[in-house]
Image (tube, rainbow, N blue to C red):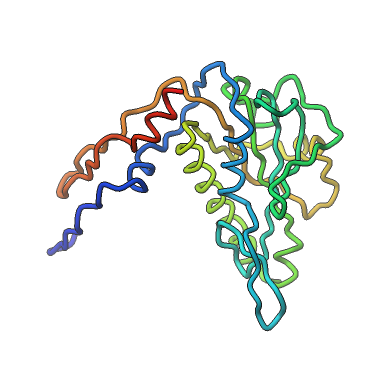
Amino acid sequence: THETTNPLPTPPENALNRLFLARRTCREPVNRPITLAQLGDCLFAGLRLIGEVETETGPLPLKTTPSGGARNPFEAYVLARHVEGLEPGIFHYAGSQHSLCRLPARPPETVAELLGDQDWVEAMPCIVFLVAYLERTMWKYSDSNAYRVVLIEAGHIGQNIMLAAAAAGLSACPTAALAHTAIRHLLGLTRLTHAPLYALTLSHPAEMVPARVSPVRGGHSFRPGPAAPEVQEMRRT
């Protein structure tokens, strides 16, 4: 314990903070497809290439999430099961074009074996796999700490996807329980340096926990009220 404390100002009641409180992980979805626009919003938030910056080593890509050394090792693959406007299938997300490219593999009838035999994933209409192309980071960093940087970046991307999902009235459920060999086979990954590291399911949640935070002992509570009106409206539709 510390003898003195310095209380921080109460966070303002703004749209960003309401979105933080609206984000929840719900493993019980309603039987309803997500839309192509909702999927696109989540992919944009996590992996969209938005420009380039000139450096002494040449142009480097800019994304919506930070990347160690601007190496951008991650690619996203989508297993679409029930997405309005998109035939079921396996897709690769092209961040430079904000588009989906269908892969030849057919989506499996069951998906639990891809994600640690977790039964709850069977009801999910869409799964996003984050695959690290490790050679991109290895090109610049040769020490083992580079692997830690790649793992941290997965968290940056995942959090952006989760917040975008919340803004769209969805719940994004992250999981690291990946069956790497089965996923690599499904996605057609043949190089050892192409490693599935993270996955997020997208769905309409059956129930959302009220956006309230209980007071913490010894401190003040952050009670910015309900979620933003636009988020509440998305939940009702």
Residue 107 is left or right of residue 35, and the answer is right
Above or below, comparing residue 81 to residue 60 in the picture: above
Residue 189 is left or right of residue 17, and the answer is right
Residue 146 is left or right of residue 102, and the answer is left
Quarter of the picture holding the N terminus: bottom left
Q: Position of residue 226 (x, y in %)?
A: 28, 34
Residue 1 is left or right of residue 85, and the answer is left
Q: Nearer the viewer, residue 143 or 43?
A: 43
> Which image quadrant is residue 111 in?
top right
Q: Position of residue 237 (x, y in %)?
A: 46, 23
Q: Nearer the viewer, residue 72 or 14?
A: 14
> Residue sitting at 19 percent across and 44 percent down?
221
Q: Nearer the viewer, residue 14 or 65?
A: 14
> Which image quadrant is residue 108 in?
top right
The count of marks equals: 0
Which residue is at the far bottom? 56
Q: Position of residue 225 (x, y in %)?
A: 24, 37
> Residue sitting at 16 percent across and 48 percent down?
220
> Residue sitting at 46 percent across and 31 percent down?
169
> Residue sitting at 73 percent across and 67 percent down?
138
Above or below, comparing residue 172 to residue 12 in the picture: above
> Which image quadrant is residue 23 in?
top left
Above or below, comparing residue 55 to residue 81 in the picture: below
Q: Position of residue 50 (x, y in %)?
A: 62, 59
